[in-house]
Amino acid sequence: MKRTLLIVGIIVVVGVGLGPWAYRTFRDQGDLIALPAFDYRTNDSWAALPPEMPPAVWAEGWAVDVILVGPDDGLAPRSQTQISSQTDRAVEQSKRLSESLSVIGPVYAPLYREANAATDLSAALKSYLDDHNRGRAFVIATDHPLPPEMLAPILDDESLRERFGGFLRLTRARGDDALFSSIAGPENTASNFLAYCPPQYAEAETCQPVVEIGRQDGMMIVSQDEPIAGDNLTGYKEWLEANVAKTAEPLGALEEVEIIDIRRPGETDPKPEASEN
């Protein structure tokens, strides 16, 4: 009898302890919530942004930005609670990586919907180029292959590709098995991959150097001691200065001007010619 009561007691204690965990776990295993599209003109659509607008290339010369598409920035919530928790984790994770990547330059990390990655990341890059870039050079750091749709502007615009410094592959130290291509799709062979890269890179591997990352306190951080991107970014600004024309400062919107007929004093409208009968 006592043994039976002991077993029952253990079951009750375990049940009480695991109850909240089981409730949260199985409650959050429903269908994915369809999130609205992000508006990247607003700050809350980004997991990381620089605290202030960096100077334009026409104001202070060449500088480099970092576009971070890293761990946990893609949201795939199955409950309202997960929307908040996943967003908070993405912000904290981007902050941890930014602490190291910011030695290169200001870091921009867009939030995006995991199920709509191509659409959202394309919109995020467009917003960055339209509203933040202002002629600066940039690199893209990622821990997984990126959709080609996102990178179409780089492929289509030679002047943009000239100031694109390539990819940084955020990779855990697990040997060659951990390596991945920075661009998704089997069609992206080495020659096709180089079409996205600036002219100073003759090989695909040099356009996507590895940056080692590891886990600390549940978050991914840059774990390597050597400089990020190795020789790729050493002297990069000098290379830009010698080989790439800076973007000129925009003239701004032109005001509409009304054109009127100017006459000398005493002049009047010409008399209409008499019609012939």
Image (cartoon, rainbow, N blue to C red):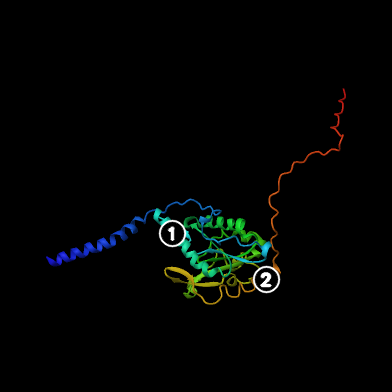
Q: Which residue is drawn at 58% across and 75% down?
A: 230
| Along the line of sight, the residue nearer the viewer: 54 or 3 | 54
Q: Which of 188 and 110 is in front in this view?
A: 110
Q: Residue furthest top?
A: 277
| Residue plotted at (22% across, 62% down) | 12
Quarter of the picture containing the N terminus is bottom left
State left or right for residue 145 relative to residue 2.
Answer: right
Q: Nearer the viewer, residue 231 or 191?
A: 231
Q: Name the residue under label 1.
A: 86
Residue 125: where, in percent of width, then height?
A: 57, 58
Q: Position of residue 176 (x, y in %)?
A: 50, 74
Compared to residue 80, the image places residue 224 above or below, namely below
Residue at the location (40% across, 57% down)?
Answer: 82
Numbered mark located on residue 10 in the image: none
Q: Name the residue under label 2.
A: 239
- Three-letter amino acid code of the residue under disc 1: Gln
Q: How far apart are marks 1 and 2 (CA)?
A: 40 Å
Q: Of helix, strand and loop, which one carries label 2?
A: helix
At label 2, the amino acid type is Trp
Q: Can residue 27 be seen in this view?
A: yes
Q: In this view, does 256 lie above or below 241?
A: above
- Residue 55 image offset from top left, x and y in percent: 63, 62
Q: Residue furthest left?
A: 1
How many neighbours does mark 1 have within 10 angstroms: few (below 14), some (14-19), or many (20 or more)?
some
Position above or below: 145 against 223: above
- Quarter of the image that includes the C terminus: top right
Q: Is residue 71 visible?
A: no
Q: Earlier in the sequence, mark 1 or mark 2?
A: 1
Going 61% across and 62% down the picture, which residue do you hit? 54
Side of 14 relative to 176 (left or right)? left
Q: How many labels does the image show?
A: 2
